[in-house]
Image (spheres, helix red, strand yellow):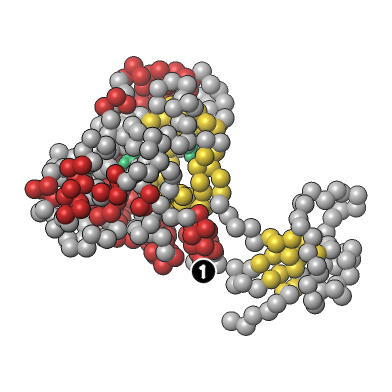
């Protein structure tokens, strides 16, 4: 942390910055903090400004394009915070932004409004106020410690925080949202793991965006956490020119699964000012998900979601196209269609209001209402 790169001179030891990058470092100073750990800096390509690592952490002049000026809190997190930095937007769980510090500052960060900003740092009394709120709300069974990055705290403070949360009987699960395995895997020390282990069930969600981030050091950090019994999930942000192609996403997911990390969410990038150059369309994201479906291990496929002030919305293309008589017509991952008889117990009202389609050729002879249903493909494909 002490050796983080935050001046041009040091940056030049790692890459040959472009004129755009040099101008942007100066011009974005007042907008968003800039910091890169030496470990993460070494993953950058020296000469390629389009390097997927470099694009995540080195400022670009694109950040100053007039884009959603004034949009700093699209999820209305502040409105959903009953006490400072505690977001209570789902009945049974809270996101507790315990710090505004991070080891690196991702240029597309959802919480740019607070991350790296001293006003959002929390004093111990403010942590205590949030803990008191959680203790007074028995419906909260899941507490997500996020930020910023909660692993920027030292062990003593983490111990203070975790022991107080664990002492609340209705808190079942404690989760940590941290990018340390990606940007500073050496933070996952044996001491830290021994500490976390005392407060199980602890889950970790981390944030790998590109296969280049899956280094041996990252693998070692993840392994230490896993050996302490901490299940690890991964949240990726879909970013233009960084991971918005099926091959990159598949390689990332498969690499994570090899390291025993479960791909959890693929986030549609939020509408945050200064990030237009990194956002992709939702159609593109849905196409990528379709390309993953059926072409890799089922649990290597994350759920593609858009976060809104009303909760996360799964952006899933429905494979169910409609109904033809008593059959539900669906598209298979191989592009063929499938008609599945859809039995209804006598007298039960239909609750699926699917659009009615003409009965495709080839299934008209299946007796509807029969009690022996044989699913079959309408269109077959040889593979
Ligand atoms: C994402 C999020 C959570 C956790 O949601 P899960 O779907 O359970 O992972 C909790 N609180 C807030 C405010 C969130 O944005
Ligand atoms: S690690 Fe997370 S909270 Fe920190 S800057 Fe990156 S995206 Fe934002």
Residue 249 appears in the rendering:
yes
Residue 173 appears in the rendering:
no
The location of residue 46, given as percent across then percent down, is 17, 61
Image vertical order of residue 194 relative to residue 163, above or below: below
Q: Residues within 10 Å of mark 1 (few under 14, many from 20)?
A: few
Q: Residue at (29%, 44%) from the top-left corner? A: 64
The quarter holding residue 213 reads bottom left
Image vertical order of residue 259 relative to residue 84, above or below: below
Residue denoted by label 1:
295
The location of residue 342, given as percent across then percent down, is 80, 60
Q: Residue at (43%, 20%) from the top-left corner? A: 83
The location of residue 24, given as percent across then percent down, is 21, 47
Image vertical order of residue 66 relative to residue 358, above or below: above
- For the residue pair 65 and 177, the one nearer the viewer reads as 65
In the rendered structure, the answer to whether residue 380 lies left or right of residue 49 reads right
- For the residue pair 339 and 230, the one nearer the viewer reads as 339
Q: Residue at (76%, 55%) from the top-left corner? A: 354
In the rendered structure, the answer to whether residue 42 lies left or right of residue 367 reads left
Question: Which quadrant is home to the N terminus?
Answer: top left
Image vertical order of residue 53 relative to residue 100, above or below: below
In the rendered structure, the answer to whether residue 161 lies left or right of residue 334 reads left
Question: In what quadrant does ligand 2 lie?
Answer: top left
The mark tally for this picture is 1
Q: Residue at (25%, 49%) from the top-left corner? A: 61
The location of residue 220, given as percent across then percent down, is 28, 53
**Numbered disc 1: secondary structure:** loop
- For the residue pair 60 and 216, the one nearer the viewer reads as 60
Question: Which quadrant is home to the C terminus?
Answer: bottom right
The furthest residue to the front: 66
């Amino acid at each position: 942390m002490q050796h983080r790169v935050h001046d041009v001179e040091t940056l030049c030891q790692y890459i040959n910055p472009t004129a755009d990058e040099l101008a942007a470092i100066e011009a974005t100073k007042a907008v968003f903090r800039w910091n890169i750990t030496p470990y993460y800096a070494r993953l950058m390509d020296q000469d390629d400004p389009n390097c997927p690592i470099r694009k995540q952490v080195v400022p670009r002049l694109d950040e100053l394009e007039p884009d959603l000026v004034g949009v700093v809190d699209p999820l209305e997190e502040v409105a959903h915070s009953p006490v400072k930095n505690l977001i209570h937007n789902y009945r049974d769980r809270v996101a507790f932004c315990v710090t505004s510090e991070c080891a690196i500052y991702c240029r597309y960060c959802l919480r740019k409004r607070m991350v790296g900003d001293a006003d959002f740092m929390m004093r111990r009394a403010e942590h205590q106020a949030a803990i008191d709120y959680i203790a007074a709300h028995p419906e909260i069974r899941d507490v997500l410690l996020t930020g910023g990055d909660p692993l920027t705290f030292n062990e003593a403070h983490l111990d203070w925080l975790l022991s107080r949360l664990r002492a609340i009987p209705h808190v079942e699960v404690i989760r940590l949202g941290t990018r340390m395995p990606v940007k500073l895997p050496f933070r996952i020390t044996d001491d830290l793991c021994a500490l976390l282990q005392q407060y199980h069930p602890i889950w970790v969600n981390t944030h790998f965006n590109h296969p280049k981030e899956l280094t041996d050091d990252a693998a070692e950090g993840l392994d230490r956490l896993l050996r302490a019994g901490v299940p690890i999930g991964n949240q990726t942000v879909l970013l233009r020119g960084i991971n918005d192609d099926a091959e990159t996403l598949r390689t990332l997911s498969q690499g994570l699964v090899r390291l025993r990390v479960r791909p959890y969410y693929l986030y549609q990038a939020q509408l945050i000012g200064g990030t237009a150059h990194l956002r992709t369309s939702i159609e593109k994201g849905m196409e990528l998900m379709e390309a993953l479906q059926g072409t890799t291990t089922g649990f290597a496929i994350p759920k593609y979601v858009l976060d809104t002030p009303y909760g996360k919305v799964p952006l899933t293309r429905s494979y169910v196209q409609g109904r033809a008589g008593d059959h539900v017509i669906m598209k298979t991952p191989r592009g063929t269609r499938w008609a599945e008889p859809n039995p209804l117990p006598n007298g039960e009202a239909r609750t699926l209001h699917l659009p009615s389609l003409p009965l495709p050729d080839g299934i008209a002879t299946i007796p509807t209402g029969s009690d022996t249903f044989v699913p079959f493909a309408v269109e077959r494909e040889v593979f």
